[in-house]
Amino acid sequence: MNAVEVVAAARRRGVVRTRSVSLLLFVAIVVVFALSLAVGDFPVPLGDLPGLLFGGDGVGRAAYVVTELRLPRAVTGVLVGVAFGTSGALFQRLLRNPLASPDVIGVTQGASAAAVVAIVLVGAGGAVVSAAALAGALLTGATIYLLARRGGVHGYRLVLVGVGVGAVLTSVVSYLMTWADVTLAQQALVWLTGNLNGRGWDHALPLAAALVVLLPAALVQSRALTGLQLGDDTAAGLGLRVERSRVTLLLVAVALAAFATAAAGPVAFVAFVANPIATRLIGGARAGLVPAALTGALVVLLGDFAAQHLLGAQLPVGVVTGAVGAPYLLWLLATANRAGRV
């Protein structure tokens, strides 16, 4: 077997494993999604779910609990996970840095600061807070890019600039929280934790509409993403418009994180851990965007299910994802430091 055949066989094995892992992740999402609809203070048999959702059995208490209370929350959780997982994968692969995720480099802090300003200073709620979070994330992403672009955008420079901007925005949030009325501060704190409680179709539908546009854009740009991972000079030699492709990918990644944060708040570390988990499951150096998106959805669904039913009290989903993601961040920093990369 010559070298070309060896490479072709390796690629085929990679494609088969990626598809198999993606299928298993999808099945796991369906299982957890069904449990999210069935388990609660008012239990619903799993066998009744198809009739309630698709069979027209839309009358009665069970139908109301499933279709009006639990279904919008679960759908929002899936969409938020997909958006965060894809955003994290784009950031980490584009910048070739495992620390590059929207909740580390300041994008979600921008959304949080804007949302807290809307809650504390304006007394806003609902859609206004979501719109403010969306605008804050997009503005912060643009600011970080402009500050980091001198001489070309490099992974560690953008991370460092993002961490600095995020620290400033976190200070703004802390000041507003100490200054605000107790009731408004409590409302802002619930939002800052990352929460799916009370999420309805007014949260899920705008995010779904955004994903209809942003996910195909991310997939279309994935070929440019592969080229950019080889370095700017090599990518330019392959015919890529390096700066244009990078700006487009960063815009898509920031927009995904912005819409997800607007829907559910800054759910901690989902974007940070989704791509590394998907990569380990696939067993390759680079995971595709689809496994990362599915992993993000599964992380959010599992986190929300645990937060509702397994910890003795109902908690925001961000508490669980933060408890999982923070040790991983510390481990990553420790191992990177030993390897001399940080």
Image: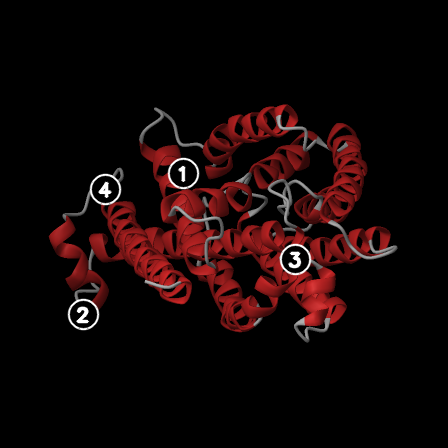
The quarter of the picture where residue 240 lies is bottom right
Residue position for label 1: 303
Question: Along the horizontal axis of the image, is 93 left or right of 4?
Answer: right
- Mark 3 is surrounded, within 10 Å at the Cα level, by few (under 14), some (14 to 19) or many (20 or more) other residues, namely many
Q: Mark 4 and 2 residues: CB-CB less than 8 Å, in contact?
A: no
Disc with the residue nearer the chain's start (1 vs 2): 2
Disc with the residue nearer the chain's start (4 vs 2): 4
What is the number of the mark on residue 254? 3
Residue position for label 4: 42
Rendered residue at 58%/56% (across/down): 90
Q: Position of residue 227 (x, y in %)?
A: 61, 65
The amino acid pointed to by label 4 is: Phe
Instruction: Give me the C-alpha separation between circle 1 and circle 2.
Output: 30 Å
Residue position for label 2: 56
Question: Along the horizontal axis of the image, is 341 left or right of 38?
Answer: right
Disc with the residue nearer the chain's start (3 vs 1): 3
